[in-house]
C-alpha cells in the first residue's frame, strides 16, 4: 500500500493468528478538512458549513461512519443569541433537507471563541434504497453553557438510501439575525465496512 489510498472494493483484513482465525476488518479516514468551512452567520437560515459525500453503494449492513467536528464562534452580537449545530445525513446536497442525526439544542454563546464539538457514530443496519441506521455520540460546548458540557445522544432507527450518494453535513443556524459568525475548524470522517 505504501501510504497510497486503496481504490478498489477489496476489504483489508488483519489476521492476528489466533486459533479461531478471527479477522478484524479495517477501514480508514475518508475525509479530513484542511481548511475552515463555510461561515454561518448574519441570518437564521441553516447553513452547510462542511460536508463529505459518501459514494453510492459504498455502505453495507454493518458499516460504521464516525464523524468528529469542531465549530468555532468568531463573532457575536448579543449574549442572548443561540447557535444550533447539526450533523445531517441524506441524499440532498442541502443539509437542512436531510435527516438530522445529532443536533445540539442551541447553546447560548457568551463570547467569541466559544466552541461546539461533536463525536458521532452512525451504524448502518440494513443497506438498500430503504436502508436503516442508528446513531449515537457526544456533544460538548465547553466554553459556554455548563449544562451542555458533555451531552450524550442516541438517534433511533432512521432511513438511509445507500444506493445513492449521501451527504454527511455539519450545519449551523443562529437564533437571531445578528452579526454572529461561526465556522467549522475541523471535520474528520472515518468509514469502516465489515466486508465487501
Image (tube, grey):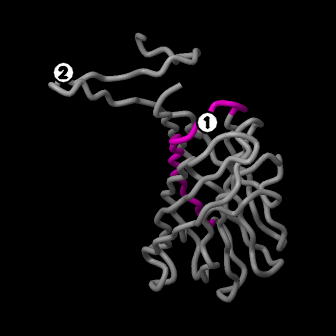
**Dot 2 lies on which element?**
loop
Please tell me which residue lies in front, 119 or 70.
119
Tell me the quadrant of the picture where the N terminus can be found.
top left
Q: Residue furthest top?
A: 2
Q: Residues within 10 Å of mark 2 (few under 14, many from 20)?
A: few
Q: Quarter of the image holding residue 42?
A: bottom right
Please tell me which residue lies in front, 79 or 18.
18
Give above or below for 196 relative to 49: above
Percent of width and height locating residue 8? 58, 15
Q: Residue furthest left?
A: 19
Percent of width and height locating residue 81? 70, 83
Percent of width and height locating residue 34? 58, 38
Q: Residues within 10 Å of mark 1 (few under 14, many from 20)?
A: many
**Residue occupied by mark 1:** 59
Rendered residue at 65%/86% (across/down): 79
Q: Is residue 146 left or right of residue 37?
A: left
**Residue occupied by mark 2:** 17
Percent of width and height locating residue 94? 83, 52
Give above or below for 65 relative to 156: above
**Dot 1 lies on which element?**
loop
Rendered residue at 70%/40% (across/down): 128
Magenta segment range? Answer: 55-73
**Magenta-span inclusion, residue 96:** no
Rendered residue at 69%/46% (across/down): 51
Question: Could you tell which of marks 2 and 1 lies nearer the N-terminus?
Answer: 2
Mark 2 touches mark 1? (CB < 8 Å):
no
Give above or below for 116 relative to 21: below
Marker count (numbered): 2
**Magenta-span inclusion, residue 72:** yes
Q: Is residue 44 left or right of residue 120?
A: right
Between the C-alphas of marks 2 and 1, the distance is: 28 Å
The disc placed on residue 194 is none
Amino acid at each position: 500500500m505504501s501510504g497510497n489510498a486503496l481504490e478498489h472494493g477489496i476489504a483489508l483484513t488483519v489476521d492476528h493468528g489466533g486459533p479461531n482465525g478471527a479477522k478484524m476488518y479495517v477501514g480508514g479516514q475518508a475525509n479530513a478538512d484542511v481548511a475552515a468551512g463555510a461561515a454561518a452567520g448574519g441570518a437564521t437560515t441553516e447553513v452547510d458549513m462542511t460536508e463529505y459525500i459518501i459514494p453510492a453503494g459504498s455502505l453495507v449492513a454493518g458499516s460504521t461512519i464516525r464523524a468528529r467536528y469542531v465549530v468555532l464562534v468568531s463573532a457575536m452580537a448579543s449574549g442572548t443569541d443561540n447557535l444550533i449545530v447539526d450533523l445531517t445525513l441524506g441524499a440532498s446536497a442541502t443539509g437542512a433537507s436531510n435527516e438530522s442525526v445529532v443536533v445540539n439544542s442551541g447553546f447560548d454563546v457568551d463570547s467569541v471563541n466559544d466552541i461546539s464539538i461533536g463525536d458521532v457514530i452512525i451504524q448502518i443496519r440494513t443497506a438498500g434504497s430503504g436502508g436503516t441506521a442508528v446513531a449515537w455520540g457526544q456533544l460538548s460546548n465547553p466554553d459556554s453553557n455548563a449544562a451542555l458540557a458533555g451531552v450524550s445522544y442516541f438517534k433511533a432507527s432512521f432511513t438511509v438510501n445507500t444506493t445513492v450518494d449521501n451527504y454527511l453535513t455539519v450545519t449551523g443556524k443562529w437564533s437571531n439575525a445578528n452579526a454572529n459568525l461561526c465556522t467549522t475548524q475541523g471535520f474528520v470522517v472515518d468509514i469502516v465496512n465489515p466486508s465487501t
